[in-house]
Image (cartoon, rainbow, N blue to C red):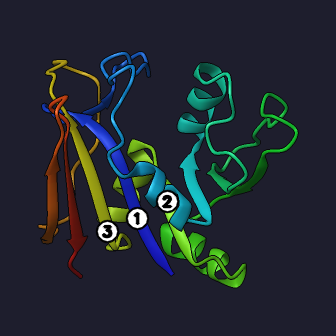
Amino acid sequence: MKISVFCGVSVDGFIARKSHTFDFLPEEPEPHGFEEFYKSIDTVVIGRNTYQVVVKYFPKWYYGKKRVVVLSSGKLDFSEAPKNAKLQQMSGEPAHILSKLKALRVKHVYLDGGITIQRFLAVGLVDRMTVTRVPVLIGEGIPLFGPVPGDIKLRHVKTKTFKSGLVTTEYDVLR
């Protein structure tokens, strides 16, 4: 099973403002590989906070027909999600979550949301990271990365620059 991250981040490292808004992202982004990446995954894993933001701020269900696993130890209310959303709740440590997904024959997981990404990275359970830097400094917000137990080595795969100033870089996470 492959575990991937694909996210946009301000140059100063934030994935969203403190208010969980994304108004610094380009309104009409150029194609930068996300569509192709998204076609390659079969499951999305997000935390409760990301789920609540997506339901609140995106009028159209952001994840389409993909299976979406929402991580939370507390009871979740899925009533605000569209009826056709394939939602499932799980809790536990990242390795436990992945063993459950493996039993479901999941092949490629997309991790989304700051805390979820940080938790899986901290225990060495991310294979590939694609980070698109948006040419803006927002000063404060929700960081992509938090404290890690030690260095996490990455191998550069490729970088692509776009006319708008977006810079997308792919890394393999070395274990």
Q: Secondary structure at mark 3?
A: strand
SS state under label 2: strand
Residue 89 horizontal side relative to residue 137, left or right: right
Q: Amino acid at mark 2?
A: Tyr
Q: CA distance from mark 3 to mark 1?
A: 5 Å
- The quadrant of the picture occupied by the C terminus is bottom left
Towards the viewer: 52 or 85 = 85
Residue that appears at 64% across and 74% down: 101
Query: Tag count in the figure?
Result: 3
- Label 3 or label 2, whichever comes before in sequence order: 2
> What mark, if any, has residue 110 been given in the picture?
2
Q: Residue at x 36, y 52 (%)?
A: 33
Distance of mark 1 from mark 2, alpha carbons?
Answer: 5 Å
User: Does any portion of residue 71 appear in the rendered image?
Assistant: yes
Residue 162 x, y percent position in the rendering: 18, 39
Q: Amino acid at mark 3?
A: Arg
Q: Which mark is residue 128?
A: 3
Quadrant hosting residue 3: bottom left
**Label 3 close to label 1 by CB (< 8 Å):** yes
Which label's residue is closer to the chain start, 3 or 1?
1
Q: Is residue 32 left or right of residue 64?
A: left
- Residue 106 picture location, percent across and down: 63, 76
